Image (cartoon, grey):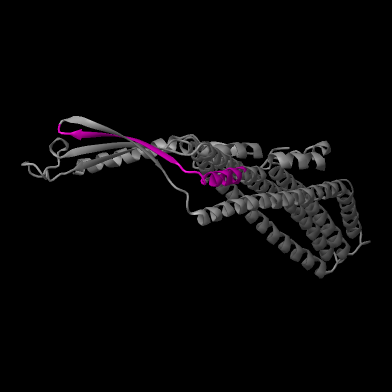
Amino acid sequence: MRSATILLAMLLLAAGSVRAAEPEQVIGGHVESLLEFARVRHPEFAALRTEADAAAARVDPAGALPDPMLRTELRNVTNAGSDASANLLPSRVGSTRYVVSQTLPWFGKRDLRREVAGAGADEAQARARAGWMDLATRIKLTYAQHHVHLLSIRYAQENLDLMQRVAEIARERYSSGLGSQQDSLRAQAEITAMQTDLIMLEGESAQASARIRALLGRPDNVRLRPPDHLRTLPPAAKLDVIALEARLRANNPQLVADEARIAGAEKGRDLVQRNRYPDVTLGVAPIQTGGRVSEWELMFEINIPLQQGSRREQEREADLMLEAARLRRQGNLNQSLSDLSESLAGLEVARRLESLVATSLMPQAELNLNAALAGYENGRVDFAAVLDAHRSLRKARLDLVKARADQQIRLAEIEKMVGEEL
């Protein structure tokens, strides 16, 4: 028993060393590597693909003939009228009837069932595409947020270093009797507030990294690199609203799923209407007497569609389901077109804001701060002007970061609605 325990422990240690020896995979740095990894490894998307494959596997069986039936009848098992005793062997009863039957659906029913299943498979495939676009959008947004957090941390650290320089100037002026103690205290309070903001930004960055790992399916032996850069925005020519609306109508996964649902509802309605006609069952029955087949019978059977009230309600249900599918598609189309226009407008605003901040507002804020610092050192400007100039620069940098993040968010939303990368 002890040797078995030692052997088991050695095997566990060997397995642990094998797992530890597995090479660590490094991904990230750019959003494309995250998307490629998630497409292959994310369990939710894999489940959607599997469901789509399962729906495709239902197409052929939906149009197949039902299985034939075999029925056996033992007649006169008591052997009445003869000297033999009761028996259950086919050759020792009065006679045995074997019936082999096959049900044949009315013309066109099998094709309609196959087409209904095919529409369901198309809808499942479109749902898988929609699931991927949703997952890809979340990855893009979280990646952009993580990048923005890192950029904000860098700016916050630069702002903090600058404010510490201002605080040092305030202390020197107070020591030499040129400034007030209040200036030094206000600088320290400003530094404390900025340190608090920096800690919050670092926490948000860590949370964004955790969200990215969750969106990738929480893989083992994978290390995430920090985002290096944001995605390049497409040229203005690719953001033409008319062209994007046309791509949305053709490629939006939700609309494609709606089209498949409409097609399935139409075929389902046709199938319900075909139920007005009976199905046919054909059969053949050899009759065994003793050890030989003494007779043959042929059978013809149909179901009689007498329940017209029930059938009319079924047809009404099918018509209403078709109308509901069409209305749902129209509603989704209207909402998608509205969201597309809103995202395009937001992208344009964010692009113009970035250009304004980067080319005008930030340079002006930097010049203003440098002038205020120089004036404060020479005693020509009070400390409040320095704080105002520093806050203006911080706000300009925050506006720049926000504008870039908004562009990435809007771009991801547009790609989700048109169903493809721009």
Q: Is residue 416 above or below residue 313?
A: above
The question of residue 401 being in magenta is answered with no
Image check: 68 left or right of 250?
A: left
Q: Nearer the viewer, residue 136 or 166?
A: 136
Q: Is residue 381 above or below residue 35?
A: below
The answer to which quarter of the image holds residue 100 is: top left
Which quadrant of the view contains residue 291? top left
| Residue 121: % across, % down | 55, 40
Q: Quadrant of the C terminus?
A: top right
Q: Which residues are magenta?
A: 263-290
Quarter in which the N terminus is drawn: top left
| Residue at 57% from the left image edge and 38% from the top image edge | 39
Image x and y of residue 107, in percent: 51, 36
The residue furthest right is 380
Q: Is residue 289 magenta?
A: yes
Q: Is residue 226 visible?
A: no
Q: Residue furthest top?
A: 292
Q: Nearer the viewer, residue 48 or 314?
A: 314
